[in-house]
Image (cartoon, rainbow, N blue to C red):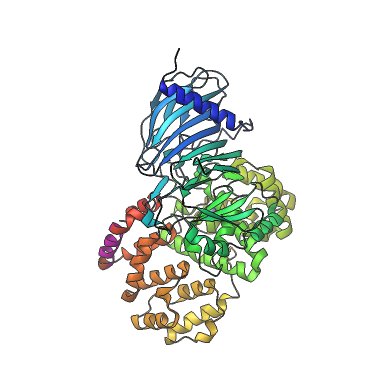
């Protein structure tokens, strides 16, 4: 029998995939009794333990053509495998055993969830399934950038964003944070661009444009990430470094020069860093988040390049995810606070190690201010202010706000205060060790907390107010509000300015970015146009090169209709796609008729620059 062309491709792919990388997945059963509403997978019956991807990136057509070979553990020895997909074109599916095509069907499509794929498999316990597919223009994880949208302006750029449930739009997978698998990928690029993936092992043959990546540690699908563009690398130390477009490299390497110290500080707190290298990839400005904790290589926004290392706590945050999130992962998106609350707590501890307690206190106060704002917006009785969420029927990207981050942080800070730092730190370290490479529901966390911290220290659940923090809205009465000594000067200056319209410039000279943020937030709700002009003349806020400060100023400018800042506002919203900045500014604009007209105009010419995550959130506001 002569194989047809597709079988030839297949034979070659199977050969190269199996030859180039041995399957290393641990065959440990996962938390498969957990029901994740956001995935169609049935891991208790058949679960994917490893994926080998063969990817061809076509920048002209804006398409990835892929072959995914899935290693399946068919626990129930049934004949059905359920895979998540959304806006993927499936060409063919084969069973490796006989190389024959197998039957498959798409199940009913649901908004934001996509179309689950039901594949007929054999009843053997271990088998491989090969899916030939293509991404489409609606593959929302992918952002294809034109050369004009990059720093260098010469080459296109591509990056993926998998969290929360977007990985299924660029490769077929069981897309639940509770399902972990190991993976490898061959990436083929036509031109001289570079590819990077969130893998521990990387190798490249630049003459052929062929890259190979392997992740031997099991991770959930949302942590598989890819970027390709004109990328250069600069080493910081033996295990940390920076990838960026050459035009951004020097600035980025300076900004993140302390990364090695951060990793050591994190290890000193909560145990060994388990992912080999820790690098940061600085993306073009349309990246929708501050950072994404893709293992081994954090994807970061260039909006934290302030030139003075003042915004690098974001890197401490993404690094902390190497423990909370990537090592111990929220089992479903309802448990998102376990990823983010722990990470914010850990981030502030890293910053305390590096910069001292007064510095970390400033971060905690700024976080608390943001939380207070969110609680006001959502209302103190809203279910959305519970730590444990109910996202059934909702897109998890819409349900995520700073409750998980800042209320989560306050809960853990409260537990630390209950038992004292020494016992608390020993508990957190043990929590990461005992649950490494596993998923955690809120309920299993509570059980773990009771046995390993509360009971042995004779603290009752009532005293710890566990249920109230997790399952009740708002914040428990009498919780400890963070305070900062360093903010006193900025707070007083803002109050005095509100009363007199005057400010003593000399007292601001030693202020950090954080003190400026506090100052702007502490100003009275209405500041008249003359006072806005006085501030701008003295401190050049409209021209600020620090995006956090500029954002705060622009927000204040919209609130007080300070028109001289509107050109900068237009430029900021056109150029930057980070949702944390973009969304509140549109929200503020939409409060007035004139603002609405301006918001519509800006959105019309900016939306092509936004990643789908940001674009859809803004559309939701309109
Ligand atoms: Zn985070």
Magenta residues, start to end:
595-604
Compare residues 185 and 310 and report the one nearer the observer: 185
- Residue 132 falls within the magenta-colored stretch: no
On the image, the x and y values in percent for residue 482 come to: 58, 67
**Quadrant into which the N terminus falls:** top left
Res 563 visible: yes
**Residue 159 drawn at (x, y percent):** 45, 48
* Residue that protrudes farthest toward the front in the picture: 207
- Pick whichever, 307 or 9, lies toward us: 9
Say above or below: 188 vs 489.
above
Residue 274, percent from left and from top: 66, 46
Residue sitting at x 52%, y 37% = 186
Residue 151, percent from left and from top: 43, 59
Q: Is residue 615 above or below residue 69?
A: below
The answer to which quarter of the image holds residue 610 is bottom left
Q: What kind of secondary structure does the magenta stretch mostly adopt?
A: helix
Asked if one can make out residue 180 in the rendered structure from this viewpoint, the answer is no
């Amino acid at each position: 029998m002569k194989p047809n062309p597709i079988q030839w491709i297949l034979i070659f792919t199977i050969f190269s995939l199996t030859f180039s990388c041995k399957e290393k997945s641990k065959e440990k059963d996962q938390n498969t009794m957990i029901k994740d509403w956001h995935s169609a997978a049935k891991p208790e019956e058949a679960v994917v333990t490893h994926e080998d991807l063969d990817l061809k990136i076509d920048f002209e057509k804006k398409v990835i053509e892929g072959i995914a070979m899935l290693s399946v553990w068919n626990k129930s020895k049934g004949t059905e495998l359920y895979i998540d997909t959304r806006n993927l074109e499936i060409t063919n599916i084969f069973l490796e055993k006989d190389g024959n095509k197998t039957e498959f069907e798409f199940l009913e499509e649901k908004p934001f969830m996509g179309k689950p794929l039901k594949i007929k498999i054999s009843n053997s316990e271990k088998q491989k399934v090969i899916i030939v597919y293509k991404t489409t223009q609606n593959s929302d994880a992918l952002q294809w950038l034109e050369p004009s949208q990059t720093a260098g302006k010469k080459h296109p750029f591509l990056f993926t964003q998998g969290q929360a449930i977007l990985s299924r739009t660029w490769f077929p997978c069981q897309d639940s944070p509770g399902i972990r698998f190991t993976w490898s990928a061959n990436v083929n690029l036509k031109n001289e661009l570079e590819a990077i993936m969130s893998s521990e092992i990387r190798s490249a043959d630049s003459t052929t444009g062929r890259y190979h990546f392997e992740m031997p540690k099991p991770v959930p699908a949302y942590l598989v990430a890819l970027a390709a563009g004109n990328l250069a690398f600069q080493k910081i130390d033996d295990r940390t470094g920076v990838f960026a477009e050459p035009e951004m490299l020097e600035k980025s390497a300076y900004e993140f020069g302390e990364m090695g110290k951060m990793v050591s500080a994190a290890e000193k707190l909560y145990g060994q860093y388990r992912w080999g290298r820790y690098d940061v990839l600085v993306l073009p400005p349309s990246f929708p988040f501050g950072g994404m904790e893709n293992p081994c290589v954090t994807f970061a926004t260039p909006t934290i390049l302030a030139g003075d290392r003042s915004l690098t706590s974001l890197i401490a945050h993404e690094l902390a995810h190497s423990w909370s999130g990537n090592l111990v992962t929220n089992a479903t998106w309802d448990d998102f606070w376990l990823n983010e609350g722990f990470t914010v707590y850990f981030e502030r501890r890293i910053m305390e190690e590096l910069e001292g307690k007064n510095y970390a206190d400033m971060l905690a106060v700024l976080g608390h201010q943001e939380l207070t704002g969110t609680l006001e917006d959502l209302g103190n009785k809203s279910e959305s202010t519970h730590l444990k969420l109910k996202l059934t029927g909702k897109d998890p990207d819409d349900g995520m706000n700073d409750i998980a981050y800042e209320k989560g942080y306050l809960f853990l800070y409260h537990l630390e205060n209950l038992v004292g730092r020494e016992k608390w730190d020993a508990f957190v370290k043990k929590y990461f060790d005992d649950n490494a490479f596993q998923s955690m529901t809120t309920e299993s966390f509570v059980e773990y907390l009771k046995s390993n911290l509360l009971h042995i220290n004779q603290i009752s659940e009532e005293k710890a107010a566990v249920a109230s923090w997790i399952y009740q809205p708002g914040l428990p009465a009498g919780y400890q509000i963070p305070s900062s000594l360093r903010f006193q000067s900025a707070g007083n200056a803002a109050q005095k300015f509100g009363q007199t319209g005057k400010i003593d410039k000399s007292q601001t000279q030693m202020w950090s970015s954080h003190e400026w943020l506090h100052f702007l937030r502490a100003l009275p709700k209405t500041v008249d146009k003359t006072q806005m002009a006085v501030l701008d003349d003295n401190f050049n806020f409209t021209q600020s090169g620090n995006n956090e400060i500029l954002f705060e100023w622009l927000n204040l400018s919209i609130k007080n209709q300070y028109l001289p800042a509107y050109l900068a506002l237009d430029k900021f919203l056109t150029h930057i796609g980070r949702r944390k900045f973009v969304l509140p500014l549109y929200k503020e604009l939409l409060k007035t008729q004139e603002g609405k007209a301006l918001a519509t105009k800006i959105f019309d010419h900016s939306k092509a620059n936004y990643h789908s995550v940001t674009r859809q959130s803004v559309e939701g506001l309109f």
